[in-house]
Amino acid sequence: MAERTIPGATDKSVLHKFESLELPSGLTQVEYIWIDGTDEGVRSKCRTLDFVPKKAADCPIWNYDGSSTYQSEGSNSDLYLYPVALFKDPFRRGNNKLVLCDVYKYNKLPVESNKRKSCAEVMEKAKDDHPWFGIEQEYSLLDYDGYPLGWPKNGYPGPQGPYYCGVGTNKVYGRDVVEAHYRACLYAGVNISGCNAEVMPSQWEFQVGPCEGISMGDELWVARYLLHRVAEEFNVVVTFDPKVMTGNWNGAGAHCNYSTEAMRKDGGLEAIEKAIEKLSKKQMEHIRAYDPNGGKDNMRRLLGSHETSSIDSFSAGVANRGASIRIPRHVAEDKKGYLEDRRPSSNCDPYSVTEIIVRTTVLDE
């Protein structure tokens, strides 16, 4: 990317000579990652271990100041990090690790922003149905001033049309960020399955999955963390806001592809149609679970235009990107496969999304 003058920016290349320093034998740096009280933000801090953890449970429980992350009061601020998923660290490399954590209070109860615990309980109940998920995570890249990366500062780029899966300097902005993120995810062990430029210029998408059960939320949260960290290297800002630009510009979603074992078997279309019927009866419950602000963020995005359904009504159709639920054309032809729920917003909590889908379609709750 071209050099830009950004307040507070540093020359990232200076770090390289320190990255080559050998660590003392047996020591490992482990970055603890958790979700903060906004239900959107990720936080992290590092500690040194005198061994190499092989699984998340090997990492000790740790604590932090929850009053600085919108999760507790200063008079009782200690919160506890329970490691739940371990990944390789693509920044420090070597034996160093990233560990995703659940957050608990002093009384061993989950904090309000801990949506993972209840999701894990639901996935355990539904484990015999083998629920699989794949989430298409859309996001936008911004300059340090909050304006979309590559957009003219005193105007707008040309109208949407040439940017989706575009190629060329005048059609895509920030591809090096996207490529670096893709490689970082693969190195870390995240099940990233693809990426592409999206409809609005400077808007991109990556896909994570298929993942079974609770691993969907774990892997997407770590992929988001990695994206923010990679963007730091380029002095670029990542936003998951579902409608970063008002007007005739596409919003951003986190379309959730979903199937059970019955849906994937021959004749599974019948199971898909039954699931859609159940989903149709709980439109507003799902809308409230599909963004961190109870549906308010999606009110700016689900307008019945720009490839979205209306927030106020439920719809489903084959190959219909304007429907709440899309059945891919090849699924209709094969009579088995999966459905795509297009309603979750880009800033959704994947634990909340996958939990309510399984509650509705498998547990009938």
Image: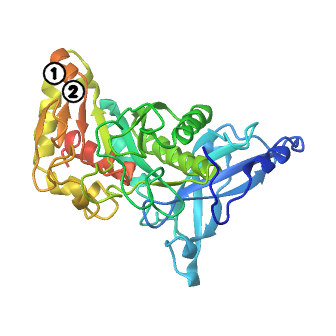
Q: Nearer the viewer, residue 145 or 296?
A: 145
Q: Position of residue 218 (x, y in %)?
A: 48, 44
Residue 273: mark in rendering: none
Q: CA distance from mark 2 to mark 1?
A: 7 Å
Write the residue at 56% across / 39% down.
Answer: 181
Q: Nearer the viewer, residue 250 or 79?
A: 250
Residue 332: mark in rendering: 1
Write the residue at 42% across / 50% down.
Answer: 140
Write the residue at 88% across / 43% down.
Answer: 21
The residue that disc 2 covers is 328
The amino acid sitting under disc 1 is Ala
Dots 2 and 1: beta carbons under 8 Å? yes
Q: Position of residue 41 (x, y in %)?
A: 49, 60
The amino acid sitting under disc 2 is Pro
Q: Position of residue 319 (x, y in %)?
A: 17, 29
Residue 336, quarter of the rendered image: top left
Q: Position of residue 196 (x, y in %)?
A: 41, 34
- State which quarter of the image contains the N terminus: top right
